[in-house]
Amino acid sequence: MDDWMTLFGSYLNSGVHRAGPGVDEVAVQEAAVACGLDFTRIDVREVSDKPGFLTAVASALEFPPYFGMNWDALHDCLTDMSWRPAAGYVLLFSGLQCLAKHSDVDVEIVPRILDEASAYWKQREVAFYVVLAE
């Protein structure tokens, strides 16, 4: 994806988007900010297990203290965001390929939760983009 501004320009484009190798993370961030969206980079390159993954996401997004450190709680927090009000959101995950190869994280459930969160916000006409960088 080269034209991040176009992608982020409408909540109708909300969803999970795979970025090719060598994605310019700064360009993603600049486009998100230019479109008035909250940008968060979540680095999971060094993650090797489910608690590590959940901690990385919770820390990056500053989840509230009641976050339960499980998949259901991740889903609940991603479809709430009341502690982080914004016009819309861009989450850039760095290192998911490493996560799939070198961890025991259930890599099937993560995309499903991210898809569900994107669909939830899209129904509410709120931009919610997940960019998966290698």
Image (spheres, grey):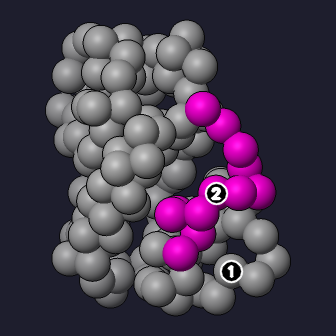
Along the line of sight, the residue nearer the viewer: 75 or 126: 126
The range drawn in magenta is 76-87
The disc labelled 2 sits on which kind of residue? Met
What numbered label is drawn on residue 81? 2
| Residue 84 covered by magenta stretch | yes
Image coordinates for residue 16, horizontal then vertical, percent:
27, 47
Cα separation, mark 1 vs mark 2, equals 12 Å
Give the answer, above or below, for where 16 lies relative to 68: above
Along the line of sight, the residue nearer the viewer: 70 or 50: 70
- Give the residue displayed 71% in from the left and 66% down from the top: 63
The image quadrant that residue 37 belongs to is top right
The image quadrant that residue 62 belongs to is bottom right
Q: Secondary structure at mark 1?
A: loop
Labels 1 and 2: the sequence-earlier one: 1
Give the answer, above or below, for where 66 lies relative to 42: below
Mark 1: few, some, or many residues within 10 Å (few <14, many ≥20)?
some
The answer to whether residue 131 is visible is: no
- Give the residue displayed 64% in from the left and 67% down from the top: 58
What numbered label is drawn on residue 67? 1
The answer to whether residue 66 is visible is: yes
Give the answer, above or below, for where 21 lies relative to 91: above
Along the line of sight, the residue nearer the viewer: 94 or 76: 76
The disc labelled 1 sits on which kind of residue? Phe
**Quarter placement of the N terminus:** top left
Image coordinates for residue 72, horizontal then vertical, percent:
47, 86
**Quarter placement of the C terminus:** top left
- Give the residue displayed 58% in from the left and 41% down from the top: 40
43 to the left or right of 16: right
Along the line of sight, the residue nearer the viewer: 32 or 20: 32
Image coordinates for residue 39, horizontal then vertical, percent:
58, 34
Magenta span main SS = loop
What numbered label is drawn on residue 3? none
